[in-house]
Structure formats: structure tokens, C-alpha cells
Image: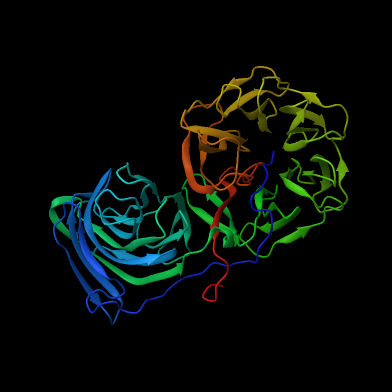
Amino acid sequence: MPAPSLLSHAWPTLGLILLALSLPACGDDLGAFEGATAIGDAPDGAVAYDPASGSYRITGGGANIWDTSDAFQYVWRRTAGDLVLEADVAWPEPGGDPHRKAGWMVRGDLTPDAAYADAVLHGDGLIALQYRPEAGGPTYEVRAPFPAPARLRLERHGDLFTLSAAPDGGDFHPVGSVTVPLPDTVYAGLAVTAHDADARTTAVFSNVGFASLGVIPDEDRVVESTLEIIDIETGVRRIVRRAREHFEAPNWSRDGSTLLYNSGGRLYTIPVDGGTPTLLDTGSATNCNNDHGYSPDGRQIALSHAPEGRPSLIYVVPATGGEPRLVTPQGPSYWHGWSPDGRTLAYCAERNGEYDIYTIPVAGGRERRLTTAPGLDDGPDYSPDGRYIYFNSVRTGRMAIWRMRADGREQIQLTHDEAYGDWFPHPSPDGRWLAFLSYESSVEGHPPNKNVWLRLMPAEGGEARVIATLFGGQGTLNVPSWSPDSKAFAFVSYRLVGPERGDAS
């Protein structure tokens, strides 16, 4: 069921960029940077800048960059606004603590407990996005699913920080995005810690790129949508399409070759390996929302469309395009699942002030109400054997994942994490896994532009694990998005970025 979008219009396309920018030298010894400081209880370090290669050799000590206070060597410059920072990071000397760290850091100030975000390489090859959202608070991290060598890219767009990494000189893969409120003007630069208060360690930063995009007013920001695929075994995320426009809710075609998504009220297909999107002819249904998906045989698409002056209704259209056929004459109705035999649709609908789970024959007919508990029930999706329907419900006071028999019997709660509000469960085609979207428990509804987590748990219930950290929510994975072989999952992440510039393409 879609919530009102804060970003309802499309924007010009922005392709991927690879920055290799350098700034004029600010000092003979520091290259593009202004200062070198030992932060916290760390000994003075050393910086050697090679203007011929543009590389930096930085030696630093300190116990760690972690927890509520940091100790490290920092080579920095003051800068304002959005940033794109890139570098290859290496340890030229063997040994040292396996938890020593070197990488990019953006920091609110030079105190040891300042709020910050960084992209760091550990001594053992681990790559991570670390962040302290508030001064004096704890530090958190998002780990990359692959080790070094990899080129690191840390981006700041407003309060959103994103780490991407390019392993072995290949394409950049998203690692994670987190929100860290920092002032417009920050310290940005290169950090090294030995993870040992009595030692020093050295890191080399080469091919350093420092792009300062300036302060961008909120009203001038545009939405950037990224259609991604994540391998659930390795955790590697691959970009299918990134554009400065708003699109949502991918579905995987039954033959595994294309993805279907919605944008601006229309449906589009795109090859899973990327390329140019193709508009799907949906006839008079030109106000589609993010509730759509393929039939089990791949020959039809169910979609939700709001005709002029009417609420959302559910239709069926040929997968190759054509005029839609109305299935639910009463609205609002939001499609979410096909039964495995292709005969029944499951959906969320508001009737008499209550949102509940309903089913209806695909051929049309009488709808059947399956849930009656007070509060919102949403996101129904069938298990691949057709025995169960998974859904999310707020009936216990916090949004959680539930399961019931396909006829509505035996409704049981599957997730119980107090830290999360869980939405939109999707069982894998092989019946082993359940993927779903989690918000912080304090968030009401399923709005856009929030810190969210894609989580995975056994379909029968059990411990859930985070497989992706991103900025998104509404539109990220409202509908079934599994690959046919159950090995990958498609979703959309978002950023609010500045308008296109002359140095981007």
C-alpha cells in the first residue's frame, strides 16, 4: 500500500561518475589538505606528500577509532556541503594490529568524541562504513561483503553518507548508507590509527580524489533512485540503474531476464544487467502505484491504478502490455501477491475505516476478508506452496511480520525485535527464506527517506539478519522482488542530491 510520496516527479537522468579530481595544493607538505592533527590520546604522526604521484604516506598511532572517543592521526581540510571522496588505500608494511584502520573521514570537529562518518580499510582487509551519529555517543559500522584490495568512495549528500567500493579495480558496489547530522562546514580528510596506544602504523593513499560540491539547499535537492540487486549469499550489491528521477518497487520476471518497476504512474522493464528502460503499455492505467507483479506463469501482471477521481483499484494486464481488466471494483485496494496456482490475488484494502488483508479470484467475483484485528494489516504474499500468506500487522502495537493459513486461520507473529518495525515480507521461490524491510521502531508507517534495513530470516521463523543498510523505505521493496532461483533480491535505494552539474555526467 503506497504512502503519499514526498518526491512525486521525475528528474533528468544522471549516470554513474568516477571522480579523479584533485584540488590545488594548500601547502608544500600536505597537498590538497590544510592541517595534520593527532586526535585524542594519540602521538604526533607524520605526513609525506608526493606531488609527482599525488599520493600521501601517513603515519599515525592511537588506540582506535571506535566507541565513544577516538585516537588517530588526521590530515584534513575544512570544507562545506556535499562531498565525493575517493582513494586507493594500502598498508605498505606487513604486521601491525589486524584492526588498525586507514581511510576517509568526515568529522564535525577535532574533539575526540565528535560525530563523524568514515570509510576505512582495516589491517586484515576488512572494509567498513563507520559512524557516530552524535557527539559522545557510540560508534556503529556497516561492513563490506568483500575485502581489500578495493578502491573506496565516501559520499556526503546532506546528512546522508554512502560508502561504495570497487574491488580489484572493477565497478563500484554500494556497501551502505547512513544518516549522520553534521554542520554544513566540516573537517574532511584522511585518517590513520594503529589500534595500539604504544605503536605507530603507516598507510599509503593513492589516486586521491576530493570533490567538494558545495552547500545545496534542501529545496534544490532532487531524488536519485538506484535499482540494485543483492546476492543473498555473498551480500554483494550490484547497480542495475541509477538516475535522478523517482522509481520504485522492482519485480523479477519469471524467466529471470528483466525487472519491472514503476515511475511517474507508468510501468517499465529493464534487463537485469542494466540498459535502457522500456515503457510497458498498460492502456488506460496511467496512474499506477508501487503495487504490481507478475503472475506465476509470467503471462500476466497485476497492478494497482487510481483512475481519475477514484481510489486505487486492482487490474490485470497481459505481461506484454495491453488494456487492463478491472478485478476489484471497490477501493482503495492495493495488490501484493498471486497465489501459486495463478487463480487468486491477495491485497490490502480499506473497508469501513479499517485496512485488512483480502483475497479475490483473478477472474473477478466476491472478495474475502482474512484479517479482522484492529489496526493496519498489509503486505500479503503467498508462500510458494500456497499454504500460507505472510503479511505485516501492527495489532500488537509495533509493526511486525506475521503468517497465516491461506484461508486466514492460525495467524501467528514471526518477528519480535523491539528495535525494528517490519514491513512487506516476501518468501523466496524455494520456500527457504523471508526477506522484508525494517525501519527504526520509532518510525510510524512506511514513509520514504529513512534509514532502513533489508533483513532475511528463515521462512518458518527464527533469527533475522541484516543483509543491506540503505536510505529508502516507501518504494524500496513493496512487492515480490526475488530472482526465480532464490539467489538474489532486487530493491531500490534513494538519495537526495544536488541538481546535475557540469562536472558530472
Residue 427 position, x and y percent, is 61, 35
Q: Using the image as rendered, state which of residue 152 and residue 139 is in the foreground.
A: 139
Q: Is residue 319 left or right of residue 120?
A: right
Q: Position of residue 358 (x, y in %)?
A: 76, 28
Q: Residue at x 25, y 73 (%)?
A: 30
Query: Which residue is located at x 68 percent, y 53 percent?
Result: 8
* 220 with respect to 95 (left or right): right
Side of 282 relative to 428 (left or right): right
Residue 163: x percent and y percent? 43, 56
Provide residue 314's location: percent of width, then percent of height: 81, 39
Q: Is residue 372 above or below residue 82?
A: above
| Identity of the residue furthest to the top in this view | 410
Q: Quadrant of residue 23?
A: bottom left
Inspect this view and state whether residue 425 appears. Answer: yes
Quadrant of the image occupied by residue 105: bottom left
Looking at the rendered structure, the number of numbered marks drawn on it comes to: 0
Outermost residue, bottom direction?
Answer: 52
Residue 25 relative to residue 394: left or right = left
The residue under the point 76% across, 59% down is 279
The quarter of the picture where the N terminus appears is top right
Quarter where residue 505 is shown: bottom right
